[in-house]
Amino acid sequence: MLRNKGIAFKLVLFFTLSSACIFVAIFTYNYFVSKRMIAKGIEENAGNLIMTTTNKIEAMLSATQKVPENIAYFLENSTNDEQELFQVLYAIVEKNPEIYGAAIAFEPYGFKKDKEYFAPYFYKAYGGINFKYLDKHYNYFLWDWYQIPRELEQPQWIEPYFGEGGGILMSSYSVPFYKKIDGKRQVAGVIVVDISLESLRDIVSSIKILASGYGFLISKNGTFVTHPMKELIMNETIFTIAEAREDAKLRDVGRKMLKGEQGVAPMWVKSAVTGKPCWMAYVPIKSSGWSLGVLFPQDELMADITNLNHIVLFLGIAGIVLLAVAVVFIARSITGPLRHMAKATEHIGAGNFDIELPSVKTGDEVGRLSEAISFMRESLKEYISELTEATASRERMESELKIAHDIQMSILPKKFPPYPERKEFDIYATIKPAREIGGDFYDFFFIDDEQLCFVIADVSGKGIPAALFMALTKTLIKAKSTMGLTTDKIISRVNEDLCIGNDMSMFVTVFCGILNVKTGAVQYTNGGHNPPLLMKKDGDVAYLGKSGELLVGAMEEAQYTARSIALGEGDSLFLYTDGVTEAMNERNDLFSEERLQKELSEFQDRTVERVVSGVMQKIVEFTGSTPQSDDITMMMITYKGE
């Protein structure tokens, strides 16, 4: 019968049947492939999302952990000075916004032989920092935050709890510290810091998956620490929810989470909020032993592909019906889309990525060209979006480095003159880091009413590692100086402490001196640092002899020597780091020690501030447009006599 039919009929029938078969095959294939691609994309995105969130949580908890761990290390190497302990605790609470309170709890009669309980506790309340003793009425020896780390002899995160009044969700991190008792290293007490988990709750609450997906956090016992349903927090565990909903899959996932495993639930679990099946990913928070879970709602995840397939099915059927009519106009339909695509390509080239592309339903060259242009448009949009995110990320990093720079600079003395009531001497110092944060530092402070300790140092390397090493060195020097030691003992003990656990083999050059402001006598030790210059009142400028002693932090058995000089009335010491003498100009010439000595000889009879500022100006003029390659730090002390 088809033999007698017209060509138009045969073309319509052929194209209709063949197109229908092709459409069914493509539709079926597209459905299953799209489903697999969505599942794969969900898994990848979930991994990225959950790891990003985990990193934020780990960063917050790790930063908190460092505080008591550092204090534990400090306590092991210090005496039980009550005033010093109070200052340390107060500084912890004051300088760390995330810390609500901190305590140092000693073993029975461990602080003093006549005190069974000694646990000073500083905490934030009523807009300030308050203090109280944890005494026998509190009996801290029986509390988890004291017993668990003491018995295990290792730091521990304590199960979350609601603070006084039940308003704030909190947790505590406890670190045992040790003392040598009868020649043995024994637990001497526990350092504990209390933190509010509100920031952590905000991080987890920020996880939004479509309309009803969410994240939650459970403790080491499975108790909900964060959850969209606030009534579950600290009242329910993942297992009680699994039992109440008879969800064996959730119970199995809960066991794996408590074991510290990471993965994806192999089967759908039910959401505690909606009761609908969800795909769930989970990962441990290693620093605290908690676990983070994220639920992805099944119906919402598959909604797009379902709607898309409905649309594709409708369009496919409509396309097949229209194809019979379109065959007649096939020739014109080829050139028409090409003109539209050419115009659309011009708009895309001009940056208009929202331009509507012509709808082409064929699988020939025109159709493939349309798909290619569409793919190109989407790729360009994605690339620009990623570029925008990368730019924002770089700006955030620059902002964080700026904050780190401000923090680093804030720990250095900046008020000059620092002791306006003292007329025996004058001192001034300045620092100019080569990067946002550097490794140079200076410090000065009174050990007692007559002795002024002054320090200048240069840490190896640059950036955050050098800054951390710098902060540790500065803290150690100040701690040792207050013990009444000579400068060689101060540097020796600091060297020993820095060598412990120095896996990165970092080191620091240090010049440490102690000036007797009554007599002008200076005792000093040079740990591998540039020799200072002695500026006599009569105009003579000369370098102090090089010590030839090792860098600090390089070798634990290194020995250091205390030397001394006497400053007469009007004599000065000029201290600096190698960033001064090694400053380089466009011709790769160094500023050099000889040039520094010459410039200082021309600055006689000037104030310490004018001398330091004048040398800095000379360095700027010498280097010109050459980028600064090393930190520049200078300090000058003039002895005026009584």
Image (cartoon, rainbow, N blue to C red):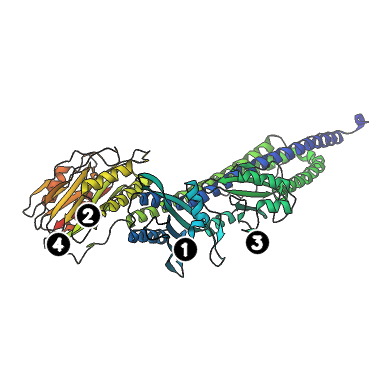
Q: Give the CA distance from mark 1 to mark 2.
A: 41 Å
The amino acid on which the numbered mark 2 sits, given as a three-letter code, is Cys
Side of 376 relative to 16 (left or right): left
Element type at mark 1: loop
Residue that numbered label 1 is attached to:
136
Q: Residue 343 carries which label?
A: none
Labels 4, 1: front one: 1
Residue that numbered label 4 is attached to:
424
Q: Where is residue 3 in the image (x, y as percent from the top left)?
A: 91, 29
The amino acid on which the numbered mark 3 sits, given as a three-letter code, is Glu
Closest to the observer: 538 or 373? 538
Q: Give the CA distance from mark 4 to mark 2.
A: 14 Å
Residue that numbered label 2 is attached to:
453
For marks 1 and 2 on the same chain, the one whose residue lies earlier in the sequence: 1
For marks 3 and 1 on the same chain, the one whose residue lies earlier in the sequence: 1
For marks 4 and 1 on the same chain, the one whose residue lies earlier in the sequence: 1
Q: Quadrant of residue 7?
A: top right
Q: Position of residue 368 (x, y in %)?
A: 67, 36
The reply to whether callout 4 and callout 1 are in contact (CB within 8 Å) is: no
